[in-house]
Amino acid sequence: MGLDFGTNTTGVAISDPFFIIANPVSIIRRKDPSNIKATINELEKICKEQEVGKIVLGLPKNMNNTSGKRVEETILFQTKLKNRLQIPVVLWDERLSTVAATNVLLEADLSRKKRSKVIDKVAAVIILQNYLDANRGKEIGKNNIL
């Protein structure tokens, strides 16, 4: 499973059974950015339904490779996910994933309003696809389940 964890939303993607293609699943929205319990509850449901063996969580480092507040929040989220779901949660550099997602949606000629509804899901796909491509041919996880 790939995640694009943002302040108010979390984009979710799942790979195919052969770990070749990442597919969009959903966007989990939070009314209160500080309350991620509902997000984790929803992710737990998806993990059980899809038999997820590993989560790839986008790490939002700055372009100059420094870490800011969003990196700290993402690492805290990673810890909470690991503790609750009891599956590996790996961090993956997500720099430019939102830019790439925006470019894909612009090429698809989606309006700004439509883009804003799906951007996080597409960013999650890009994060997971980059991870899958970088790890092609390697054992990805327990029983090769991602």
Image (spheres, rainbow, N blue to C red):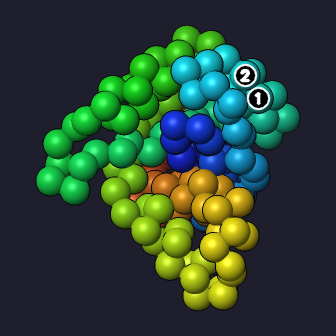
Residue in view at x 31 percent, y 31 percent? 69
Q: Name the amino acid type tagged 2.
A: Ala
Query: What residue is shown with label 2?
Result: 38
Quick check: 14 above or below 90?
below
Q: Nearer the viewer, mark 2 or mark 1?
A: 2
Quick check: 49 above or below 87?
below
Q: Position of residue 75 (x, y in %)?
A: 39, 26
Q: Quadrant of residue 120?
A: bottom right
Residue 42 — which label?
A: 1
How far separated are the C-alphas under marks 2 and 1?
Answer: 6 Å
Looking at the rendered image, the quarter that the C terminus falls into is top right
Q: Name the amino acid type tagged 1.
A: Glu
Residue in view at x 75 percent, y 49 percent? 26
Q: Quadrant of residue 134?
A: bottom left
Query: Outermost residue, right direction?
Result: 49
Residue 100 or 130: which is nearer the viewer?
100
Q: Secondary structure at mark 2?
A: helix
Quick check: 130 above or below 69?
below
Total of numbered circles in the picture? 2
Q: Position of residue 125 (x, y in %)?
A: 59, 59
